[in-house]
Image (cartoon, grey):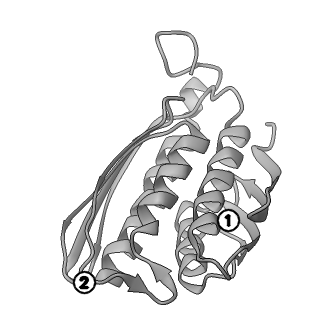
Amino acid sequence: MTPRTATLERITHETKIQVTLTLDGTGQRTIKTGIGFLDHMLDQLAKHSQMDLTCLAEGDLHIDAHHTVEDTGWAIGSALKQALGDKRGIQRYGHAYVPMDETLTRVALDLSGRPFLIWHLTFSQPRLGEMDTELFREWFQAFAMGSGTTLHVENLYGVNNHHKIESTYKALALALKTAFSRDPARLHDLPSTKGTL
């Protein structure tokens, strides 16, 4: 069976990002974005989806983290789209509920090729570590656009901001793992009546 992997590089005047992603991995990861909290979240994404992920980013952090966060989301999403190939045999849909202490978060997604983000997540403080909390939506928006994923994200309840966003990345990981997994009974089938995804 053909390995589902992708490597890409994104270079702009604002960022330089290298991503290598293998869907059928074991969760091995090398994450260095220059933003500690984002590294922590991408570590969760790789670990719980069992994707092997390398993400090396250099950005204009002397300005702020916006460009690095957004471009990292786009690059990882684009690598996912590339690794999926023609999407034959995948489950296509995935969802997950993740509790983290007092917090519960739900992510539902469709690897449809039609990018869309529904975001119901609020924070009670402007920063986590050195990262502005408003940038988490930017990461998810860029990921959805790069990967062509319809993505619904909702924090059902919770108090601690760290728990809210960490449970969100873990839920994304588990939903992705389901969606990109292969159905042994339909390995050559495209999961769409349209004939294309």
Q: Is residue 186 above or below residue 20?
A: above
Residue 49 appears at what percent x and percent y? 55, 60
In the rendered image, the vertical position of residue 175 relative to residue 16, given as above or below: above
Quarter of the rendering occupied by the C terminus: top right
Callout 2: helix, strand or loop?
A: loop
In the picture provided, is 178 more to the left or to the right than 38? Answer: left
In front of the other: 6 or 76: 76
Measured along the vertical axis of the image, is residue 62 above or below residue 99? below
Could you tell me residue 77's position as x and y percent?
A: 62, 49
Q: Amino acid at mark 1?
A: Thr
Q: Foreground: 114 or 193?
A: 114
Residue drawn at x 60%, y 29% is 89
The residues bearing labels 1 and 2 have C-alpha atoms spaced at a distance of: 26 Å
Residue depicted at x 47% and y 50%: 141
What residue occupies the far top of the structure in this picture? 194
Residue 164 relative to residue 49: left or right: left
Q: Residues within 10 Å of mark 1 (few under 14, many from 20)?
A: some
Quadrant of the image containing the N terminus: top right
Q: Are marks 1 and 2 in contact (CB under 8 Å)?
A: no
Q: Who comes first in sequence, dot 1 or dot 2?
A: 1
- Which quadrant holds residue 127? bottom left
Tell me the residue at 25%/68% (across/down): 122
Give the image quarter of residue 63: bottom right
**Disc 2 crowd, CA 10 A, few/some/many (<14, 14-19, 20+):** few
**Residue under numbered circle 2:** 101
- Left or right: 172, with 163 as reference point: right
